[in-house]
Image (cartoon, helix red, strand yellow):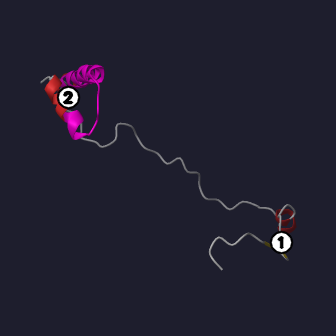
Amino acid sequence: MALTRADVVHVAHLARLGLEEDELARLEGQLNHILDQYAKLAELDTDDIAPTAQTIELESILRDDVARPSLDAPTALANAPRRDGDFIVVPAIIGE
């Protein structure tokens, strides 16, 4: 099944794309190439292949959540622009 120029013009109209003649010709060729590739894929024997939503195995990339030593309060407060005792003072982000 090949797309005609009229098909491409119709799809461009539905997508509200204002395409020039050279763009329509280029898209007609590209879309027909895509359809040809799908036709080749449809020729493959996939009877022994289980349906899947993923083509590659997914694995977690997150590290384990492990407690580690952190800065002590004086070190953490040493570069704070403003502080109040053992707390860092930050600008309010919600109306007062």
| Lower position in the chain sequence, tag 1 or tag 2 | 2
Up-down relation of residue 88 to residue 55 (above or below):
below
Residue 29 in view (yes/no): yes
Type of amino acid at the residue the image marks with label 1? Arg
Image point (85%, 61%), residue name: 79
Image point (55%, 51%), residue name: 62
Q: Nearer the viewer, residue 41 or 66?
A: 41
Up-down relation of residue 35 to residue 54 (above or below):
above
**58 in the magenta segment:** no
| Magenta stretch, main secondary structure class | helix
Type of amino acid at the residue the image marks with label 2? Val
Report helix, strand or loop for mark 1: strand
Question: Which disc, if any, is residue 8?
Answer: 2
Quarter of the image that includes the N terminus: top left
Tell me the residue that label 1 is attached to. 83
Up-down relation of residue 93 to residue 49 (above or below):
below
Would you identify the image quadrant in which residue 35 lies?
top left
Question: What segment is highlighted magenta in the picture?
Answer: 11-39
Residue furthest to the left in view is 1
Report helix, strand or loop for mark 2: helix
